[in-house]
Amino acid sequence: MGETSKSLNFIEQIIEEDLRSTHSKSDLRFRFPPEPNGYLHIGHASSICLNFGLGLRYNAPVNLRFDDTNPAKEEKAFVDAIKRDVSWLGYEWDTERYASDYFQQLYDWAVLLIKNGKAYVDSQTSEEMAVQKGTPTEAGSPSPFRERSVEENMQLFQDMKAGKFEEGTHVLRAKINMASPNMLMRDPIMYRILHKAHHRTNTDWCIYPMYDWTHGESDYIEQVSHSLCTLEFLPHRELYDWFLDQVYNPAQLRPKQREFARRNLSHTVVSKRKLLRLVQENVVEGWDDPRMPTISGLRRRGYTPESIRNFADTIGIAKRENLIDVSLLEFHVREHLNKITPRVMGVLDPLKVVITNYPEGKEEWLEAENSPEDESMGTRKIPFGRELYIEKADFKEEANRKFFRLKLGGEVRLKNGYIIKAESCTKDDNGEIIEVQCSYDPKSLSGSGTEESLRKIKGTLHWVSVAHALPAEIRLYDRLFTHESPDGQKDRDFMDFVNPASLEVLTGYVEPSLASAQEEERFQFQRMGYFCVDRQSTPEHLIFNRTVGLRDSWVKIQGKDD
């Protein structure tokens, strides 16, 4: 029992305490409340895993609620993308809700606040209100419209709803305390006028509730027990509770807001505004560009739901913000892909090898296992012939004793194939090596059991048969930013740190078993890394995205490298 309590994060400890004092298990309900104004990113993944993970832990329902109160920025396309991402991560929501479901109820409650003298219509400009609100060290001053009569406020609010006023002419404000040390309590705005069509309510409304007014009341309507927010909402908790006080019925469950820290990822940005700028300025191809930290971008790059969930579980829930090195995320995807991906051969930067003593026109189909991690993946046949492609970097005319790849006069083993020896090479007019002539030992075939096949050779190379090789576009992705914290630098725009080498496109060759590879199918290209079939790939034009290399940089950072 002691061990279990040790493993609880502080949010779970709060819930456990509530279960001992004020709540029963049947009271528990959680929610994930994204605004549909962009795509979900890796930061949202932590919140998704937290809320849905609590749902699974306590066998409690979790609502997916869209905070759709700003029609200027929200679209149904974003709603669909969010639902797709949450499902892809492996979670099921209990009910699909929208803040717009509650527009009438929120309006009715706002009317109640006006009648109780707790809200008023303010006709100042936004600039005047900003001045009148004061500063963190100086109290605000009352609006000149703060003491309007209930009747005048009611008439103005009804006329706002009826569309009789232009945007920016009036707002509805809660009447709280202009001297509060918490500036959010200084008569916050509850409604503003927006003459824009909403993706669900169309033009039924032209006044829209603000986040602080909407969020807690939505939790209350849905009877959410624990409303979990990131740390920047801690100052909002006082206002969350004040708004609940105005409508709370003791016969119903009262939601409790609690906050956890954002976990920022190095070498990226997660602000939707900044991600949008990357899209609009064509730094990336779109929201699902594999360099983006969006869930759809990570998916397209080849990340698995399991790796993202494991990453979220590892970084855990904390009370203080910190920067997580992206190599930890890469560690988790590498660890999972190692277990589940079949091994194949792909040459990214090809150099032709001709085996001069191999019979012309001869073709062999060699046996290769698909995964040393999972025997159930079975084996496949790969073609072998007189002409092969290897990586350019795997051959040198001359090299020192520590170079265990191919060099003139040296031997290597071809993966699943024969031992070859480099005899000579051909260069073009610029002195670039364009072909290597080799001899092979016909008795050295891997797995044949001959004495020659058991000979110890230090270097093993991957390869593909020229006659059977499929050309493929290979996209090598790197960090999108050169600085680990691009948006945290004073006097510098985050765009100054965009990595100009974040994408390299090569034309390589892959073995013929990949001819029918499907979108999002993942493979380990032996010795080269993990790759995923891109959504733009076709049988006529194969495209593979590199998810991550084979090198485990996170383990090395932690001092655990062998």
Image: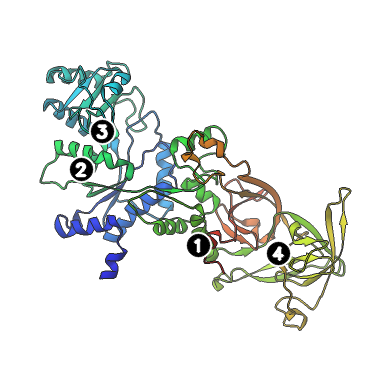
Q: What amino acid is at disc 2?
A: Tyr
Residues tagged 4 and 2 counted as in contact (Cβ below 8 A): no
Residue at image coords 29%, 69%? 3
Tell which circle, 3 or 2, labels the residue nearer the N-terminal end: 3
Q: What amino acid is at disc 3?
A: Leu
Kind of element beneath mark 1: loop
Q: Gap in Å between the C-alphas at discs 3 and 2?
A: 20 Å
The number of callouts visible is 4
Q: Gap in Å between the C-alphas at discs 1 and 4?
A: 30 Å
Q: Nearer the viewer, residue 318 or 44?
A: 318
Label 4 sits on residue: 462
Tell which circle, 1 or 2, labels the residue nearer the N-terminal end: 2
Q: Nearer the viewer, residue 369 or 332?
A: 332
Q: Quadrant of residue 27?
A: bottom left
Q: What number is the disc on residue 558? A: 1
- Relative side of 302 to 137, left or right: right
